[in-house]
């Protein structure tokens, strides 16, 4: 018995170490100048490496390593989301005022609702539609990973959603500076910062696009984006409630009119609550900036491990199974973000 436990722990350790090596490689590649120029984070590089592994070497390694890979895609992921709170403070919210809060709230809620509705019309897998919608609405891959922890879909579905938001977020990152310089939008720096922060997918995309425009735009855009990131917490709590309600409904149907089905408990995503707690702690400013920077680097490494693990569970066959519809959905949501963001950035600063 003791031998079996030790063997299982060793097998899990092999999988974890493999994902650690992938994360190290992703950090190295992510530090290359041409990768930085594309504003591709180590997390994105990590999922690409994981997918390359899934479609090449996966069948040549022991299946006993799989538990370690799953551990990274679930447990390590949640811990990484918790530590993500060290990037945020409540002072950021106060700095930009209610204009940014209202704009972000409208974008997040409308994008998720529209995405889920379009997913039904397009007959897309519900999990993929929800993951893609939340990734587009909140903060790209980080939001997809957070929702993954709440609804626990199959890994390939999460990888498909990440791929869609990364593709369209990257396209938008290059498009925004062009539109700004050409005067297509007619925005001043304040409006452009609001537009960029409330509509671009990834934090890295916001940083890349806003830095290509001006420091003034960059400062406001990043804060607006971070407020969107905070909205991941209420979204996860609502999803937890909905998942519990669906479980209860299925249990009631299974009872087929017999004795009342037991009530399903709401599985609270505690990592989301702890994420909010960490934001509160970080708002107190008790830790030196160097320590916070170190935590953020470590957190990026953990999330990169999780992304690599998700990629390692995603083969080309699973992408074929998902089809082109998730990318169509992501394109439609991108068009919505461009249009709705323009209306909000044009109107809100003048009335608030």
Image (tube, rainbow, N blue to C red):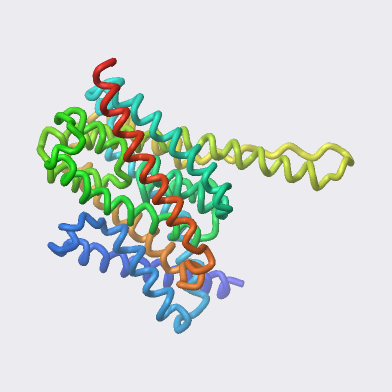
Q: Nearer the viewer, residue 60 or 171?
A: 171
Whole-percent x, y for residue 142 in the image: 37, 48
Q: Residue at image x 40%, y 46%?
A: 135
Residue 173 vertical position relative to residue 67 in the rendered view, above or below? above
**On the picture, is 49 further left or further right than 263?**
left
Q: Residue at x 27, y 45 (%)?
A: 203
Residue placed most toward the observer, 287 or 314: 314
Farthest-out residue, top: 351
Residue at 48% over, 43% down: 115
Q: Does the image show residue 24? A: yes
Question: What residue lies at 47% left-to-right and 39% top-to-bottom?
Answer: 112
Residue 298 seen in the current view: no
User: Position of 131 compared to 240: left or right?
Assistant: left
Rendered location of residue 57, percent (x, y): 41, 80
**Residue 60 at x, y = what percent?**
45, 84
Residue 143 sits in quarter: top left
- Quadrant housing the C terminus: top left
| For residue 315, above or below residue 202 | below
User: Residue placed farthest to the bottom in the image?
Assistant: 60
- The number of callouts visible is 0
Quarter that holds the N terminus: bottom right
Q: Quadrant of residue 267?
A: top right
Residue in the foreground of this view, choosing between 84 and 108: 108
Percent x, y for residue 285?
23, 30
């Amino acid at each position: 018995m003791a031998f079996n436990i030790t063997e299982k722990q060793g097998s899990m350790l092999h999988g974890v170490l493999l994902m650690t090596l992938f994360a190290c490689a992703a950090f190295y590649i992510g530090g290359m100048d041409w990768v930085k120029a594309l504003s591709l984070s180590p997390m994105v590089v990590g999922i690409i490496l994981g997918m390359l592994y899934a479609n090449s070497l996966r069948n040549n390694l022991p299946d006993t390593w799989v538990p370690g890979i799953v551990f990274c895609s679930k447990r390590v992921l949640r811990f990484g989301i918790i530590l993500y709170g060290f990037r945020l403070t409540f002072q950021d919210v106060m700095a930009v005022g209610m204009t940014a809060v209202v704009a972000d709230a409208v974008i997040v809620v409308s994008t998720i609702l529209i995405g889920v509705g379009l997913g039904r019309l397009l007959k897309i897998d519900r999990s993929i539609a929800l993951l893609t919608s939340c990734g587009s609405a909140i903060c790209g891959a980080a939001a997809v990973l957070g929702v993954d922890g709440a609804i626990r879909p199959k890994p390939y579905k999460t990888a498909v959603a990440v791929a869609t938001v990364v593709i369209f977020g990257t396209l938008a990152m290059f498009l925004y500076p062009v539109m700004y310089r050409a005067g297509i939008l007619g925005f001043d720096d304040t409006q452009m910062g609001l537009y960029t922060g409330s509509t671009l997918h990834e934090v890295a995309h916001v940083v890349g696009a806003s830095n290509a425009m001006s420091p003034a735009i960059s400062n406001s855009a990043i804060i607006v984006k971070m407020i969107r990131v905070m909205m991941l917490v209420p979204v996860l709590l609502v999803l937890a409630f909905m998942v519990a309600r669906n479980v209860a409904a299925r249990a009631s149907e299974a009872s087929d009119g017999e004795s009342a089905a037991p009530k399903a408990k709401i599985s609270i995503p505690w990592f989301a609550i702890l994420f909010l707690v960490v934001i509160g702690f970080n708002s107190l400013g008790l830790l030196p900036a160097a320590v916070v920077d170190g935590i953020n680097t470590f957190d990026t490494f953990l999330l990169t491990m999780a992304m690599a693990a998700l990629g390692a569970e995603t083969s080309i066959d699973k992408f074929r199974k998902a089809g082109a519809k998730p990318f169509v959905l992501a394109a439609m949501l991108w068009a919505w973000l461009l249009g709705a963001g323009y209306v909000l950035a044009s109107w809100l600063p003048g009335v608030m």
